[in-house]
């Protein structure tokens, strides 16, 4: 084949490609003017050497129904009767792990049975409620570390507005993280479970002191408005295995009280259950563990009747 014929063939092929691009572009513009939210169909001309066929292709508009992006639920328990996207997330995880057959968006009796089956198999507390431990097993609990704010350790001997020495995880005034929204008013304690942080606030809404704690692994700290109802200089854990110093109680449960106290020590050898550096992670069975200096501040600040706002 001579060079003149080659040039003619290339010119013809270029014309076909340009025509196809022009046709697709015009079709796309027309589709963009369509107000319908349903997937639109654009006919595109596909040319194969020596032949021409027309193929109908659906535009991907909105979410891909085949998407398998991971989801998480809020840091709260999902219970029977709940509906919505968080339940969908839970059910998708249960289906994926072969505990459930289909997704309905409603936390019905079938979903409760599936959750109970998972809790039984994994030796969790069995109640049919999808809380933190269940969600962790299913991989749908948010990354808690992203919500924990760690302030720089204060200088040695630094004190809060009431003259109490700050621990390594405590801060005061403007150096403390801001109070969460909707955390009450007046003199009070504010405990944010997601961030594992406590604020002591004066009557003018000034932050006296803020510090990290180690709260419950089981999501059994009830959100809402509470108050300090009991205090003990030293007590023992419900299972009798630990000493708890400076206990400030604010919630009653079926197996015992929940409250703020110093990092516990084993009765057997007087060793601590955790280090101060581990504060900010959920490690307890219900109470909020504190550094020694923070527990001493709490003991002075939280008299009987002190409001405790739990978020």
Image (spheres, rainbow, N blue to C red):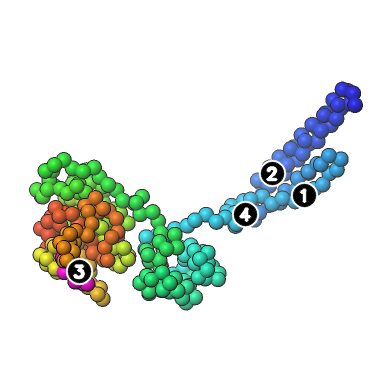
* Mark positioned earlier in the residue sequence (4 or 3): 4
Question: Which stretch appears magenta?
Answer: 236-244
Q: Would you place residue 247 above or below residue 151 in this image? A: below
Mark 1, secondary structure of its residue: strand
Residue situated in front as seen by the camera: 61 or 196: 196
- Mark 2 falls on what kind of element? helix
Q: Secondary structure at mark 4?
A: loop
Residue 46 left/right relative to 268: right
Q: Position of residue 268 (x, y in %)?
A: 17, 66
Q: Which residue is mark 1?
A: 55
Q: Which mark is residue 28?
A: 2
Whichever of labels 4 and 2 marks the residue nearer the N terminus, that label is 2
x 52%, y 71%: residue: 100
Cα–Cα span, label 1 and label 4: 22 Å
Find disc 4 in the rendering and name its residue. 37
- Gap between marks 3 and 1 measured at Cα: 72 Å
Say which residue label 3 marks.
Answer: 241
The quarter in which the C terminus is drawn is bottom left
């Amino acid at each position: 084949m001579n060079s003149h014929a080659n040039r003619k063939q290339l010119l013809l092929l270029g014309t076909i490609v340009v025509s196809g691009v022009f046709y697709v572009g015009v079709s796309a513009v027309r589709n963009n003017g369509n107000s319908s939210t349903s997937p639109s169909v654009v006919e595109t001309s596909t040319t194969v050497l020596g032949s021409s066929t027309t193929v109908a292709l659906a535009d991907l508009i909105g979410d891909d129904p085949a998407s398998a992006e991971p989801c998480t639920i809020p840091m709260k328990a999902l219970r029977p009767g709940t509906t919505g996207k968080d339940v969908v997330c839970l059910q998708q995880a249960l289906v994926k792990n072969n505990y459930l057959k289909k997704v309905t968006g409603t936390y019905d009796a079938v979903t409760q049975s599936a959750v109970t089956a998972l809790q039984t198999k994994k030796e969790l507390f069995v109640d049919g409620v999808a809380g933190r431990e269940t969600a962790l097993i299913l991989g749908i609990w948010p990354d808690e570390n992203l919500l924990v704010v760690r302030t720089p350790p204060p200088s040695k001997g630094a004190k809060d507005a009431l003259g109490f020495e700050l621990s390594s995880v405590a801060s005061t005034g403007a150096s403390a993280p801001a109070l969460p929204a909707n955390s009450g008013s007046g003199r009070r304690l504010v405990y944010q479970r997601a961030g594992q942080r406590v604020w002591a606030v004066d009557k003018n809404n000034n932050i006296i002191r803020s510090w990290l704690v180690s709260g419950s692994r089981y999501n059994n700290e009830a959100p809402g408005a509470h108050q300090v109802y009991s205090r003990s200089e030293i007590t023992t854990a419900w299972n009798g295995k630990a000493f708890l110093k400076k206990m400030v109680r604010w919630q009653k449960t079926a197996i015992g009280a929940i409250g703020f106290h110093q990092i516990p020590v084993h009765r057997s050898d007087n060793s601590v259950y955790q280090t101060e550096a581990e504060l900010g992670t959920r490690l307890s069975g219900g109470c909020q563990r504190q550094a020694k200096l923070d527990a001493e501040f709490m003991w002075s600040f939280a008299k009987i009747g002190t409001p405790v706002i739990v978020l």
